[in-house]
Image (cartoon, rainbow, N blue to C red):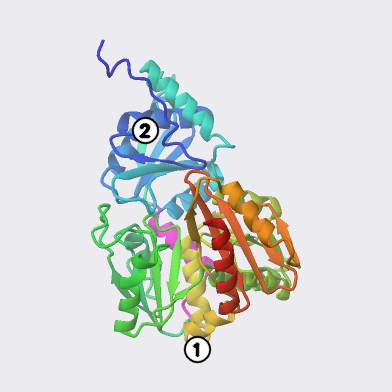
Amino acid sequence: MTSEQTKTFDLSASFKAYDVRGIVGDSITAEIVEAVGAAFVDVLKLEGQTVLVGGDMRPSSPEFAKAFADGAATRGANVQLLDLISTDELYYACGSLNAAGATFTASHNPAEYNGIKMSKAGAQPISSESGLKEIQALAEEYLNTRSIPAAATRGQIGVQDVLKGYAEYLRELVDLSGSRPLKVVVDAGNGMAGLTTPAVLGDALLPKLPFEIIPLYFELDGSFPNHPANPLEPENLRDLQAAVIKHGADIGLAFDGDADRCFVIDEKGEPVSPSAITGMVARREIARAQAQGEATPTIIHNLLTSRAVPELVEHDGGRAVRTRVGHSFIKAVMAEEGAVFGGEHSAHFYFRDFWNADTGMLAAMHVLAALGEQDGPLSELGHEYEPYVSSGEINSEIEDKAGAVERVRVDFAAEDITVDTMDGSTFTANDGSFWFNLRPSNTEPFLRLNVEATDRPLMERVRDRVLANVRR
């Protein structure tokens, strides 16, 4: 018996809270993926039903999609291969076709990674609380016994293209045909937005919109030759900022690798914060829901978004619901509350009309609509939604995270402050002048700080005071 035959599989390194992610050839291989495909069908009881499988532009995605399909078909599911898709295309397909599905992507992670995002029928999320742990355990069992039992009837494997349907559906949700002409630079980062942008915003599949699209890195290339497909990092926005200035564009859009997140740059080359985008989209979605007879539409925001968001929501007649950080939490609260829209500081945007799932493209379309229906520049429009000054997220590498938080608590004990512990510790000045959140990373020795205040000098004073305690 070879050492390979006696190998014991433990997938805990790649199974995360709400997806699978690992290094290709190490913690994620075709053999592992085939077992996960079989376990996916068994845990969700999908024998005889349709399973949708796609992948992004990473070199390993086609092989992995085929392996997952083989595992699923062995256990009796009928598989439709969707070929190259963005993550929000998977959500569209699972929602519109009412079928469970999986896509191979590692989002913004480097080229050596790949992973699996899985969804139940209706684009309902799968997390460690709703099936992912069971899928992991059964996949390990199949791998360690080196046997995936065959169902009575093997499933069929076919091919289906959902790109045009996805583009048509998004255009139904946001009508951009009446916009003033806009010059739009889009940085796809060699990721899936290179495929979805021409389909949705361009004229590759549908009639032309009043936009001049200037493409940046639209070539699908999972080696990411130009910059990492992670627009959360400021250095990865520099090419887009320069292109917006060079072309005299009205707006710049940057997508991450699997195109489920979107970041926005104004005509001056300055970022528009995800909190401002959340406010902008929330205003539009509240107005639309009210026009359809909904008295008090609900908007979800995580606790790190600007407090301008709940203030705007209340002002516009909506109801703001605050939640902890993390998209599985947001999706759950979206469903519980019947919320029309949800936004996160990390540029994930969720829509009830999109099966409560996140889509960067739909958020981008709302921003284009807001910009295109008035005459002013995006810098002025965005400023309306950013009345406060924020620090951005600041990481401190520290082992005793609880001790650091306690030092801050003691230092601010004499202040007129309220502290809550929904997700980390949020300190809020009762006069409304500032708030800050200290949140420990679950996976790294980091304590994450976010500060917001009414002006920059106050924000910097609070920031420096907190960091002095944390890093002491």
Q: Residue furthest top?
A: 1
Q: Quadrant of the N terminus?
A: top left
Q: Give percent across and percent down for residue 23.
A: 32, 40
Q: Give percent across and percent down for residue 297.
A: 70, 65
Task: Tell me the magenta residue range.
Answer: 162-178
Name the secondary structure under disc 2: helix
**Looking at the rendered structure, which numbered label has been put on residue 120?**
none
Q: Residue furthest front?
A: 472
User: Marks 1/2: CA distance?
Assistant: 50 Å
**Residue 232 within the segment the image draws in magenta:** no
Q: Residue at x 75, y 69 (%)?
A: 430
Q: Residue furthest bottom?
A: 375
> What secondary structure is the stretch in magenta mostly built from?
helix
* Nearer to us in this view, 420 or 281: 420
Q: Is residue 20 depicted above or below 218 in this figure?
A: above
Identify the residue position indicated by label 1 in the image: 376
Q: Give percent across and percent down for residue 159.
A: 34, 43
- Disc 1 crowd rating (10 Å Cα; few below 14, some 14-19, many 20+) is few
The answer to whether residue 323 shows anywhere in this view is: no
Pick whichever of labels 1 and 2 is earlier in the sequence. 2
Query: Label 1 amino acid?
Result: Gly
Name the secondary structure under disc 1: loop
Q: Residue at x 38, y 24 (%)?
A: 9
**Residue 173 within the segment the image draws in magenta:** yes
**Looking at the rendered structure, which numbered label has been put on residue 33?**
2
* Nearer to us in this view, 208 or 218: 218
Q: Give percent across and percent down for residue 89.
A: 43, 54
* Nearer to us in this view, 103 or 266: 266
Left or right, 64 with respect to 415, comes to left
